[in-house]
Image (cartoon, coloured by chain):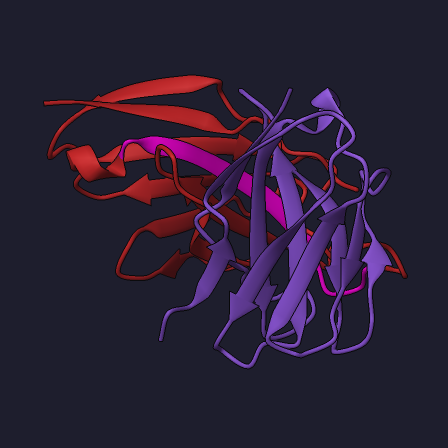
Amino acid sequence: NAGVTQTPKFRVLKTGQSMTLLCAQDMNHEYMYWYRQDPGMGLRLIHYSVGEGTTAKGEVPDGYNVSRLKKQNFLLGLESAAPSQTSVYFCASSYRLAGVQYFGPGTRLLVL
Amino acid sequence: DAKTTQPNSMESNEEEPVHLPCNHSTISGTDYIHWYRQLPSQGPEYVIHGLTSNVNNRMASLAIAEDRKSSTLILHRATLRDAAVYYCILRTLDSGGGADGLTFGKGTHLIIQP
């Protein structure tokens, strides 16, 4: 099993550009999460999903949208990137509510 | 959410045991104590979790105080590969309708000397 994979690994954007980060998991997990991590900080929850077709806001949802059209994929979109969104983005999945979370390797995003 | 307090950093020697403390004085009865670690340039990795009793797995042991207001993650024989940031996180099965995510603090940066 590949576990949780993220695409792309690294991206540079200009202010105002849009992009989509892809997270895929092959563990048949119901729950998926997007976090961001700024330098020297712990991770913060952006959005999460408790099943296919569902999404919910986390701690820092502004400026991001998500979609969960297929159980194995969770997409994070930035419609108009801002320098404040420069961060490392981690995706995670879990088999149940409050269960162990399995993380992907991260996507490093730089917004100029 | 109940908070946790951890030292910013700790240093240990290779092949010696490491005890990483965590205080959680406002823990509730439904809170599980989870530990994750994050190696450099990687995503967080689950280490261990427990509710009341001490727990052991292949990676570490978790010692929970009788009043549950503190816990200690024990690495029995640290290696250089254990150098990471260790996060102590409280998780409840009853999210009360709130977001089901992990609340990360700054964690403890563990440095292993060869």
Q: Which residues are magenta?
A: B83-95
**Quadrant in which residue A13 is drawn:** top right
The x, y position of residue A12, in whole percent, is: 56, 31
The x, y position of residue B52, in whole percent, is: 56, 58
Q: Is residue B51 visible?
A: no
In the rendered image, the vertical position of residue B93 relative to residue B41, given as above or below: below
Question: Would residue A56 be found to the left or right of residue B63 on screen?
Answer: right
Front residue of this view, candidates B77 and A39: A39
Question: Would residue A53 be found to the left or right of residue B32 on screen?
Answer: right
Q: Which residue is pictured at 54% across the width and 67% down the height?
A: A24
Q: Quadrant of the N terminus of chain A?
A: bottom left
Residue at the far right in the pictured view: B97
Question: Would residue A27 be found to the left or right of residue A42 on screen?
Answer: left
Q: Is residue B24 visible?
A: yes
**Quadrant in which residue B104 is drawn:** top right
Q: Colour of chain B?
A: red
The x, y position of residue A9, in whole percent, is: 45, 45
In the rendered image, the vertical position of residue B46 relative to residue B17, given as above or below: below
Q: Say whether residue B25 is magenta.
A: no
Q: Which chain is purple?
A: A
Q: Which residue is pictured at 71% across the width and 34% down the height?
A: B3
Q: Say whether residue B87 is magenta.
A: yes
The x, y position of residue B30, in whole percent, is: 73, 59
Front residue of this view, candidates A97 and A104: A104
Q: Quadrant of the C terminus of chain A?
A: top right
Predominant SS of the magenta segment: strand
Q: Which residue is pictured at 39% across the width and 41% down the height?
A: B42
Q: Which residue is pictured at 82% across the width and 64% down the height?
A: A55
